[in-house]
Amino acid sequence: MRPGSILADAVSRRFRVHARETRTLKELLVARGRTGGHDVWALRDVSLEIRPGEAVGLVGRNGSGKSTLLRVLAGIIKPTAGRVEVGGRIGSLLELGAGFHPDFSGRENVFLNGSIQGLRRAEISERFDEIVAFAELEHAIDRPLRTYSSGMAMRLGFAIAAFLRADVLLLDEVFAVGDENFQRKCFGVIAEFKNGGGTILFVSHDARAVERLCERSLLLCDGEKVYDGPTHEAIVRYRRLLADDLDPAERGGGLREWGSGEAEIVGARLLGAAGEEREQFLAGEPIAVAVSIEAHEQLPAPALHLQIRDTTGLLVAEDTLDTASVGWPAAPGRFDVRLDVERPPLAFGRLHVRLGLVSADGRTLHQLDDALGFLVYPDGDERGLVRLGGTWSSDAKRWSR
């Protein structure tokens, strides 16, 4: 088989799940007859073929079988039925940091983990400085791993796996690693691997990352392949699967946009007092949010939800617009609305705007978790996220003699 080729032919994977795990002989005897398990099919007859040099996305809801398929292709688990072939060396970025020993130094773990990944000691030594520099751990490489933060350990794991000379990269939510700057570095390394002719199979809930990296994507649903084709169409179908869920669990894995798509938020801007686009404001300055909605078919007036949250996800403020009250059109087309806040109580902080368009029957038409971002600077000595805005007074008569 050519290096970089991937073939899965009617692959199925079954797990035996028990309602209650028995830990002791006594528990086993007491629970005898009540410990029967049941079969869970994580994959059912999934077939795919990927040519050398292709970058293919793998999308679907939690529990759809994405990670199981990657582990089958990586050889970590065997399929219950079907056939799998992968040509050349496989680089797996599935569980960053797996194989690390907490009492070994970062340096020792690089050689240990590199050996597990299939590198010879000479190869690891040749790339050691590059791995450490990429992980930004020059200051800590000789400290025990137990003194590392979880982010430091994940950066080191990614650096080792990313610099493995592989023909195939299997990636599972790797852009959840580290801060935004490190995520950009990760994407740069993966894009360089792709441009060099490497084959990539990429799992992520971040639709923008999948569309940037992959021209083709597969959509899995309940362990079955339901679509294989252009990435944009796969993402559209995936978002429709989430349309009935106002707060999907996939948010924790990087999901930032979803919806059934009958109407979409096609534009959003933050404006200053003179109508100019802004990303930075002084505390107390007027702020306007301009939103453009595109209705692709005739539908009852939806509700537009707006939330302002800080970088930790804390809800700072929210508002809801019934678009019928501002003249939602009966026909398909573009519809522009604007929210003006003359004296916002925001005092200081980096904030994000979430926008959601919800149909009259409660379906999510379109949700944008990171629609806008902006920064508020204090205009005085205030501290904290919001301005209190109160007035002090005293009861002077109580103190008169």
Image: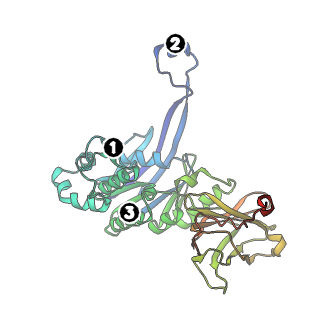
Residue 270 screen position, x and y as percent: 63, 77
Name the one closer to the observer, 374 or 191.
Answer: 374
As drawn, 270 above or below 363 = below
Give the residue at mark 1: 146
* Label 3: which secondary element: helix
For the question of whether residue 260 can be seen, the reply is: no
Quadrant for residue 184, please give it. Answer: bottom left
Which circle, 1 or 2, is nearer the viewer? 1
Judged by depth in the image, the label closer to the viewer, 3 or 2, is 3
| Three-letter residue code for mark 1 | Arg
Which residue is nearer to you in this view: 310 or 117? Answer: 310
Q: Quadrant of the N terminus?
A: bottom left
Crowd class of label 1 (few under 14; some 14 to 19; many from 20; radius 10 Å): some
Q: Are marks 1 and 2 in contact (CB under 8 Å)?
A: no
Q: Pointer 2: residues within 10 angstroms few (<14), some, or many (20+)?
A: few
> Horizontal and vertical percent for residue 398?
79, 58
Residue at the location (18% across, 50% down)?
120
Which quadrant of the rendered structure holds the C terminus? bottom right
Q: Dot 3 corresponds to which residue? A: 186
Foreground residue, 13 or 293? 293
Q: Is residue 257 left or right of residue 263?
A: left
Secondary element at image label 2: helix
Q: What mark, if any, has residue 92 been given in the picture?
A: none
**Label 1 SS:** helix
Going from N to C along the chain, the mark reached first, 3 or 2, is 2
The residue labelled by disc 2 is 29
Dividing the picture into quadrants, the one containing residue 332 is bottom right
In the rendered image, the residue lying farthest to the front is 401
